[in-house]
Image (cartoon, helix red, strand yellow):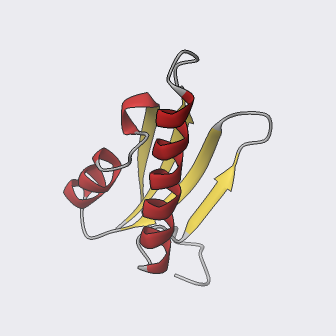
Amino acid sequence: MFFHVRMDVRIPHDLDPKVRAATVGREKAYSQELQRAGKWPHIWRIVGEYSNYSIFEVESGDELDQILSDLPLFPYMDIAVTPLATHPSDIHG
């Protein structure tokens, strides 16, 4: 299953800088692990925002929920998920 996910990161300004750096580092490592595994095949930064659009390819909504919940920055994110289906005009589908 494919999902389009928008993630808006809202780290509190008063978060300890060391905690922030460690959390962002763990986030990067985890997201790259998911990319290498093929679960997170696309990620784009939204210009001018601390946000991204991503495509996830997972077995189920439950799997996606677990992946998103495990993101180290999850407590600081607003997330919008859209399930995707193959378009009948898609020549690659």
Q: Is any atom of residue 36 visible in this view? A: yes
Residue 64 rendering spot, x and y as whole percentages = 30, 56
Residue drawn at point x = 24 percent, y = 60 percent: 63
Residue 65 rendering spot, x and y as whole percentages = 26, 50
Residue drawn at point x = 33 percent, y = 68 percent: 58
**Relative to 78, is 93 above or below?**
below
Task: Indicate left or right for 25 with 34 as reference.
Answer: right
Residue drawn at point x = 58 percent, y = 17 percent: 13
Q: Nearer the viewer, residue 41 or 25?
A: 25
Residue 79 rendering spot, x and y as whole percentages = 44, 36
Q: Quadrant of the N terminus?
A: bottom left
Residue at the limit of the structure toward the bottom, as seen here: 92
Residue at the limit of the structure toward the left, as seen here: 62
**Relative to 22, is 17 above or below?**
above
Task: Indicate left or right for 71 with 91 as reference.
Answer: left
Q: Is any atom of residue 86 visible in this view? A: no
**Relative to 8, is 84 above or below?**
below
Residue drawn at point x = 24 percent, y = 53 percent: 66
